[in-house]
Image (cartoon, rainbow, N blue to C red):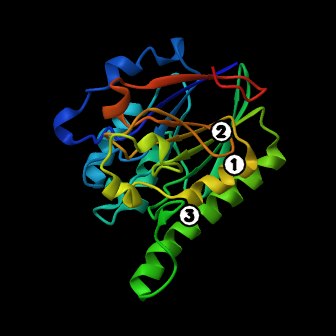
């Protein structure tokens, strides 16, 4: 049994330093690992990243993160990632990591992802160069996620989880205006998730969405944006048999 805690969209700034820390100090009593699903800062500045580092550094469990669109806003994503890595967090972008836990080996593949929409209502790689760029960005993110998942196969984790910021399914977007669904995620992210038949896929970004969904291939998907889960983190119990309880 592996207890996975997860949260996204905490949007920390310098004026709320220490806001989450009291709820995180005893996290090891409830979880074995903490996943952060992006939008850790408000505007993606290095100063805000220092607040994130102080908030999540030195916890009694490993912390694994992806960045979100807010974390890219100031064009300092590389510096933000580096600072978080220096604080002891693992930041994924088209990459993967494994953690040996008491309940087994956990594999996490992560990518920020991007928009584009979902089957029947999605953007296509056609027309203006700008539209092609939009769709190709998502295609590249999905390709990086697939490569990260394939790389994990050699590590033979007992449980594998995908961590993204953008949603891989429309099911966890219920509550968001349908008009903006193409900017909240893409079905292209779901294809490698279903092909790998993961134990769980975790994302954020959809503040007005719903927590629980399932992929077309039957993979449990959870939207852990903090405005959705309304807590410092949500916890999911995963078994090596890849059953979510």
Label 2's element?
Answer: loop
Decide: is 136 above or below 188.
Answer: below
The residue located at (25%, 26%) in the rendering is 19
Measured as percent of width and height from the top left, residue 135 is found at 49, 73
Q: Residues within 10 Å of mark 1 (few under 14, many from 20)?
A: some
Decide: is 157 above or below 141.
Answer: above
Label 2 and label 3: CA atoms lie apart by 19 Å
Q: Nearer the viewer, residue 207 or 6?
A: 207
Give yes or no for contact between labels 2 and 1 (Cβ–Cβ under 8 Å): yes
Of circles 2 and 3, which is in front? 2
Measured as percent of width and height from the top left, residue 59 is found at 47, 25
Task: Give the side of residue 206 with respect to residue 47, left or right.
Answer: right
To which residue does mark 3 refer?
A: 141
Measured as percent of width and height from the top left, residue 12 is found at 27, 40
Label 1 and label 3: CA atoms lie apart by 15 Å
The residue located at (47%, 81%) in the rendering is 132
Q: Earlier in the sequence, mark 2 or mark 3?
A: 3
Q: Nearer the viewer, residue 203 or 103?
A: 203
Label 1's element?
Answer: helix
Label 3's element?
Answer: helix
Q: Residues within 10 Å of mark 2 (few under 14, many from 20)?
A: many
Query: Which label was assigned to residue 219?
Result: 2
Query: Which label was assigned to residue 194?
Result: 1
Decide: is 120 above or below 128.
Answer: above
As drawn, the residue found furthest toward the front would be 120
Rendered-image quadrant of the C terminus? top right
Query: Which label was assigned to residue 226?
Result: none
Label 2 and label 1: CA atoms lie apart by 7 Å
Measured as percent of width and height from the top left, residue 220 is found at 61, 35
Q: Earlier in the sequence, mark 2 or mark 1?
A: 1
Of circles 1 and 3, which is in front? 1
């Amino acid at each position: 049994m592996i207890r996975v805690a997860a949260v996204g969209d905490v949007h920390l700034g310098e004026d709320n330093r220490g806001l989450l820390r009291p709820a995180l100090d005893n996290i090891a009593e409830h979880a074995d690992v903490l996943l952060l699903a992006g939008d850790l800062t408000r505007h993606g500045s290095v100063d805000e990243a220092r607040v994130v580092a102080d908030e999540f550094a030195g916890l009694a469990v490993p912390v694994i993160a992806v960045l979100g669109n807010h974390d890219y806003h100031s064009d300092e994503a590389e510096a933000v990632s580096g600072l978080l890595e220096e604080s002891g967090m693992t930041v994924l972008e088209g990459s993967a990591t494994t953690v040996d836990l008491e309940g087994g080996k956990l594999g996490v593949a992560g990518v920020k992802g991007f928009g584009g929409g979902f089957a029947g209502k999605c953007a296509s790689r056609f027309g203006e160069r700008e539209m092609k760029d939009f769709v190709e960005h998502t295609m590249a993110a999905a390709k990086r996620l697939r490569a990260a998942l394939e790389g994990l196969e050699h590590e033979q984790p007992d449980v594998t989880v995908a961590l993204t910021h953008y949603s891989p399914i429309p099911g966890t977007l219920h509550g968001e205006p349908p008009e903006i669904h193409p900017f909240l995620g893409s079905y292209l992210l779901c294809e490698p998730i279903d092909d790998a038949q993961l134990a769980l896929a975790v994302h954020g970004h959809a503040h007005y969405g719903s927590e629980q969904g399932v992929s077309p291939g039957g993979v449990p998907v959870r939207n852990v944006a903090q405005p959705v889960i309304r807590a410092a983190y949500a916890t999911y119990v995963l078994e090596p048999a890849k059953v979510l309880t």
